[in-house]
Image: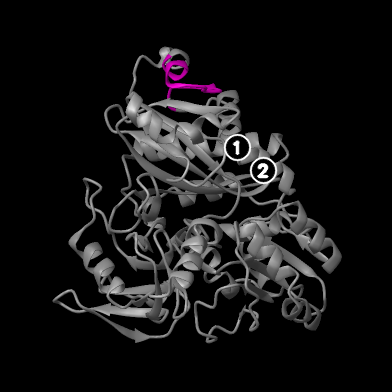
Amino acid sequence: MSTIKSISDIRRYFHNNKEPVYFISATNFNLLGIGDWVGNFRHINYIDCFDGKQKNVFVPKEKFPRDFESIEDINNYLLEHKEVIDYLQSRGGTGTAAFLMFDEHTEEICEQLGLKIAFPPAKLRSRMDNKIETVRIGNKVGVPSVPNVLAKVDSYEHLTEVSKPLNTTDLVIQSAYGDSGHTTFFVSNEDEYYKYAEEIEAEPEVKIMKRINCRGSAIEACTTRCGTVVGPLMTELVGFKALTPYKGGWCGNEMFSGAFSQEVRDKAREYTFQYGEALREEGYRGYFELDFLIDQDTEEVFLGELNPRVTGASSLTNVAAFAHSDVPLFLFHLLEFSGEDFDVDIEELNERWSHPESIDSWSQLVIKHTDESVDLLTKAPESGVWKMAGDGSISYDHYSYHPHAAESEQEAFFMRISGVGDFRYEGADLGILITRGRLMDDDFQLTPRAKAWIDGIRGQFSGQALQDPAVEAVAVNHAIGGGNFKIL
């Protein structure tokens, strides 16, 4: 094939794609709808969110009891499952695999199966995923972080000593790895420190930040040989008790053209481009996401963290107006790993994607079980399009696999994660709701519509209390050890 030079060339190339491409993960949430753009694209998942209705999703029928500790564990389990191996063989036995998370064992299995991984090596991804390394890379290229110090902490006295340059005792402490809400600690006095002392002191180095009055935001991008393609700046929903039990836990996003001021949006896009170019210098290429913290008092833009992968925000990035008028951001990632020669005008594309008219309004809610109770689900809602009546009640309308099927703000696409027969425990992902329009107001509080959707979806779940102490012990162990990690 000749050099790919235009958006129409990219569309045609992927439409005609013959080589199998797989997204292997616990669910297909992160890349919803990508199969509409890429020929021979399939999802291989552990959880059947669509009750067998979605034809490009393969879920092995036989499940072997396992306590998974990570998404990598789930993916390795899938790749070593006989039904999955047979499925791969039935489709030619070769192809390209993409993951939300993978490790070096995943790489070994893929090599044995004849699958190419469309991501940089796991070792490099792990280094880039380190929050301490994120700060250092940003500092090198002029992408500032919130005022911070990096140090090993041995005690509260030691913390106050090493954090003196910040001129405050109101601190936010993060470990190098871990999901937001699990490894982010808010410390303003000795009593608060001792709540988290064991976890903080176990780390070889932590990031100690001055606490600022900020709003969270997210922006996804893809660094390619032609430059870094940058998506829109999205607001983040963080720590809402109606959605998550974790104080700093991510629980959704909003995408709309007026997210923050034009100056803030431009600065975030500029920083993202600079960071993407720096990642390429480090040897990393492909899809990534940056969290930015926007200081509400000064409108300064600070680097929060790097996620070197597709993320929970990808479901919005890849369904927006700019994605459908051109191509989804993830296609640039696949193109970078395709081996094809391409020379696309990234500057012109970024300019077009920065225009407000390229960004329509979408929001998503990640709904977790927030009670401390543990029970067994006996009823769960179907995935598909749900409608809201004038009184705020909701009802199932029809099956769909794509958020675009929700045509108005009175409709929403809901993708169920926890189903009948699953344990419902504190922090368990119940499902994701995606709808048009905003779900937060200008003060970053949930709107009445958001609250009605949350209450309505929660009302579709029912559980049976666990009477048998032995069964309850198994469930609690699942919640604490095997199941209580982010699968999105």
Residue type, numbered disc 2: Ser
Residue 334: x percent and y percent?
A: 68, 60
Which residue is farthest left? 391
Does the magenta run of residues contain 148? yes
- Report the front residue among 264 and 237: 237
Would you call the spot at circle 1 few (<14 residues within 10 Å), some (14-19), or many (20 or more)?
Answer: some
Q: Is residue 34 above or below residue 3?
A: below
x, y percent for residue 214: 32, 35
Q: Position of residue 39 (x, y in %)?
A: 67, 75
Give the percent coordinates (x, y) of residue 253.
38, 54
For the residues marked 1 and 2, what is the alpha-carbon distance in whole angstroms?
7 Å
- Give the answer, above or below, for where 231 lies relative to 291: below
Estimate how packed mark 2 is, as few (under 14), some (14 to 19) or many (20 or more) residues with alpha carbons within 10 Å: some
Residue identified by numbered label 1: 130
Q: Say what amino acid the circle numbered 1 marks.
A: Asn
Mark number for residue 126? 2
Marks 1/2 in contact by CB < 8 Å: the verdict is yes
Tell me, yes or no, whether the highlighted magenta stretch contains residue 163: no
Lateral position of residue 351 relative to residue 332, left or right: left
**Depth check, front residue: 170 or 298:** 170
Report the side of 437 relative to 403 (left or right).
Answer: left
Give the magenta-colored segment's residue range. Answer: 146-160
Could you tell whether 96 is left or right of 443 in the image?
right
Considering the numbered disc 2 on the image, is that residue within a helix, a strand or a loop? helix
